[in-house]
């Protein structure tokens, strides 16, 4: 760890950014005692010192001083997105990861490409107050032109258009759970009648056939389980068989990548 007047530096001897030193060599550092004139030698490691930048620390640097930084001192500035100034100085700018201050960095020593991009972004920039004023004015013009009643009607029409073409309508005001999605909205009378013939095989299935279909996995587990408990009443049994056949067919279709119509 070292420290200058502007900031602290920390060295890391681990991680992906560590200097690759020759492991066959040994490094030493000598410390000269000014009083005795003797030098003591210690084992050492070589690693890069990087500036320590903390969120709680306010660092300042005059713009003129910033421009005087050597090229070798600039990479960390770009990587960390910081501009530094000395604490308590005047005529400087303070930065907390600010895009405005990064723009000043680009103006100071950015590449030609970066400067062109900065100039283009500034020309196309729109202030938030301008956007807010424009939106408020546009909303007021629409209200004055169409009126609140017409806007409410448009909103209701949009809600109707947003109804899914695949899901049945949801009746949120239903007084019973089975009325939230009505059966006739899921299966039309014509579709329900068309299920009578194919569902007859399920309605007349025997216990042995259910066990065989379970071994062959010809149906999903839910359908196989429900086939074991079909109602004895003929009408209820036929109704449940049609529903199970329809559900099983939907599940089969969901597993197909390509559905061919016959």
Image (cartoon, rainbow, N blue to C red):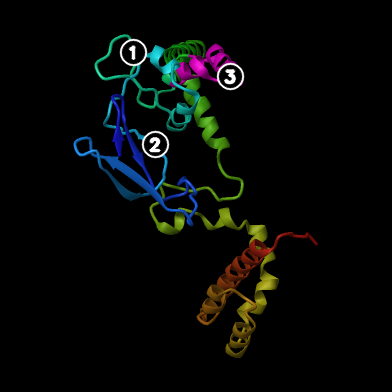
Q: Is residue 4 visible?
A: yes
User: For residue 114: magenta?
Assistant: yes
The residue indicated by pointer 2 is: 50
Tell me which segment is drawn in magenta.
102-126
On screen, residue 186 above or below 134: below
Q: Secondary structure at mark 2?
A: strand
Structural crowding at the residue carrying mark 1, measured as other residues with C-alpha within 10 Å and reported as few (<14), some (14–19) or many (≥20): some
Q: Quadrant of residue 62?
A: top left
Depth check, mark 3 against mark 1: the one in front is: 1
Left/right of residue 105 with respect to residue 60 in the rendered view = right
The reply to whether the C-beta atoms of the residues labelled 2 and 1 are less than 8 Å apart is no
The residue indicated by pointer 1 is: 92
Look at the image and tell me in which quarter the N terminus lies: top left
- Seen at 48% across and 50% down, the residue is 21
- Seen at 40% across and 26% down, the residue is 82
Residue most toward the bottom? 208
Structural crowding at the residue carrying mark 3, measured as other residues with C-alpha within 10 Å and reported as few (<14), some (14–19) or many (≥20): few
| Residue 117 image label | 3
Q: Nearer the viewer, residue 156 or 182?
A: 156
Q: Is residue 147 visible?
A: no
Residue 71 % position (x, y): 50, 24
Q: First in sequence: mark 3 or mark 2?
A: 2
Q: First in sequence: mark 2 or mark 1?
A: 2
Look at the image and tell me in which quarter the C terminus lies: bottom right
């Amino acid at each position: 760890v070292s420290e200058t007047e502007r900031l602290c530096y920390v060295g890391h001897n681990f991680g992906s950014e560590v200097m690759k030193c020759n492991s066959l060599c040994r490094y030493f550092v000598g410390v000269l005692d000014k009083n005795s004139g003797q030098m003591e030698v210690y084992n050492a490691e070589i690693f890069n010192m990087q500036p320590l930048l903390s969120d709680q620390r306010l660092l300042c640097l005059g713009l003129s001083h910033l421009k005087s930084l050597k090229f070798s001192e600039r990479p960390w500035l770009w990587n960390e997105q910081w501009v530094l100034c000395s604490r308590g100085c005047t005529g400087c700018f303070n930065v907390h990861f600010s895009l405005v201050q990064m723009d000043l960095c680009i103006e100071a020593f950015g590449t030609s490409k970066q400067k062109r991009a900065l100039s283009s972004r500034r020309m196309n920039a729109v202030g938030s107050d301008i956007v807010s004023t424009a939106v408020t004015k546009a909303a007021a013009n629409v209200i004055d032109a169409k009126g609140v009643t017409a806007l409410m009607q448009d909103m209701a029409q949009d809600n109707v258009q947003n109804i899914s073409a695949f899901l049945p309508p949801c009746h949120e005001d239903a007084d019973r759970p089975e009325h939230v999605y009505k059966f006739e909205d899921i299966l039309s009378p014509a579709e329900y009648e068309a299920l009578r013939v194919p569902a007859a095989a399920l309605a007349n299935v025997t216990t042995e056939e259910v066990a065989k279909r379970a071994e062959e996995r010809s149906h999903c587990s839910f359908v196989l389980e429900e086939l074991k408990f079909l109602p004895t009443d003929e009408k209820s049994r036929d109704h449940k068989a049609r529903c199970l056949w329809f559900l099983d067919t939907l599940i089969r279709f969901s597993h197909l990548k390509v559905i061919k119509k016959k």
